[in-house]
Image: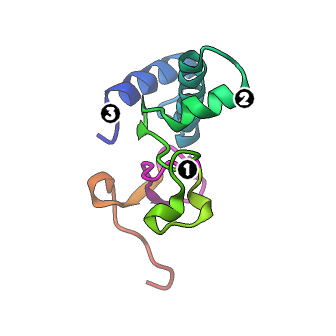
Amino acid sequence: TMYNERALKMANDYKAQTGKSGVESYALEAYDSIGVIAQAINEAGSTNGDAIVTALENISHDGTLGRIYFPYGSKKDPSADGKGDEWWHQWPDPAITMVQYQKEGEPSNTMTIVFPDVYKTGDPIYIGN
């Protein structure tokens, strides 16, 4: 399965609440977004924007999509590792999958995962083959 323990619990709760047979990726992303900001507010002890940013720059959040952290910010410029400004406050290794709709009208929660191999549910279909 491509779910960690936290994701599996969230997926089961989500399916029970919605009656759906699967979980859309955006539901996991939204769940993690709320979890990250809630943890940052708790750690900051405040809803002050600067305090939240400081907390986010130091956060390590175990989310449904993996460990979420932001290594580049006011304490470490991305250029120190030869990276561009686009890396400021970015999660460097999100759980990414390449998916492909292979049937007309296919819902997003059943499309084929073609990469990475660890999550692969089928081979890609190439146009013209």
Q: Mark 1 points at which residue?
A: 90
Q: How far separated are the C-alphas under marks 1 and 2?
A: 17 Å
The C terminus lies in quadrant: bottom left
Q: What residue occupies the far bottom of the structure in this picture?
A: 128
Residue 94 place in picture, x, y as percent: 45, 49
N-terminal-most mark, 3 or 1: 3
- Mark 1, other Cα within 10 Å: few <14 / some 14–19 / many ≥20: some
- Image point 52% across, 42% down: which residue? 25
Q: Mark 3 points at which residue?
A: 4
**Quarter containing the N terminus:** top left
**Residue 63: x, y in percent?**
43, 31
Horizontal side of 116 relative to 108 (left or right) equals left
Region in magenta: 89-110
Q: Is mark 2 on a helix, strand or loop?
A: helix
Image vertical order of residue 80 relative to residue 91, above or below? below
Question: Which mark is nearer the camera, 3 or 2?
Answer: 2
Q: Which sits earlier in the primary sequence, circle 3 or circle 2?
A: 3
